[in-house]
Image: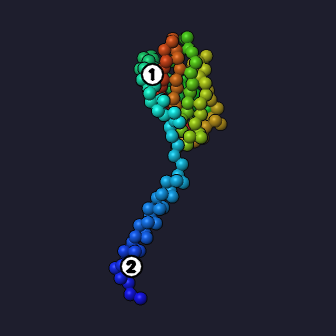
Amino acid sequence: MKFTWGHGVTIAFVLFMVYILSFVYRSFVNEVDLVAEDYYAQEIAYQDRIDDIANAKHLEDDIHVRQTSEGVEIAFPEEELIDAGSGTIQFFRPSDEELDIQVPLQLYEARQQLPLQLFHKGRYKVNIAWKSNGEGRYITKEVVL
């Protein structure tokens, strides 16, 4: 049997189809996590977030997030303890949605300690939102555990 250019075109076409089908298969197998399920609703209300970020920039001292031997410590300026309302701390793990952690903010003391057992090793984006003196505040930090 003699190999002709027709055979070469057919083989090239079949290999190209296998290549394309492998991409289609991988696109269905790979899981893609959204940053948030209600992304569009959050986008509409983003001006409030911009105002909260601007309110947090006026703090005299910065908020510190660091790992200690007991766990993860979040240190707040003393000025935020006065007339502090409710808030949340979200540890957002960009690589895996299931490793996200959200805890209520407790501004009774200048430091809030979270046990290290809650976390997996890796990078977390820490989003802290709270109300103080009737104004919303929002700050973002990064920590590697």
Please tell me how crowded label 1 is: few (under 14), some (14-19), or many (20+) other residues with Cα within 10 Å: some
Mark 1 belongs to which amino acid? Answer: Asp
Q: Quadrant of the C terminus?
A: top right
Q: For residue 82, what is the image quadrant?
A: top right
Please tell me how crowded label 2 is: few (under 14), some (14-19), or many (20+) other residues with Cα within 10 Å: few
Residue 46 seen: yes
Residue denoted by label 1: 48
Side of 121 where 9 appears, left or right: left
Q: Nearer the viewer, mark 2 or mark 1?
A: 2
Q: Residue at 39% x, 79% y: name it.
A: 7
| Whole-percent x, y for residue 132 in the image | 52, 14
Can you tell which mark lies on residue 34? none
In the figure, 38 relative to 30: above or below?
above
Residue denoted by label 2: 7
| Whole-percent x, y for residue 96 in the image | 55, 43
Q: Residue furthest bottom?
A: 1
**Sequence-wise first label, 2 or 1:** 2
Q: Residue furthest left?
A: 5
As measured in the structure, the alpha-carbon distance from the residue carrying label 2 to the one carrying label 1 is 64 Å
| Whole-percent x, y for residue 64 in the image | 51, 26
Side of 110 where 1 appears, left or right: left
Q: Residue at 41% x, 74% y: name it.
A: 11
Residue 124 seen: no
The way the protein has been coloured in the rendering is rainbow
Q: Quadrant of the N terminus?
A: bottom left
Mark 2 belongs to which amino acid? Answer: His
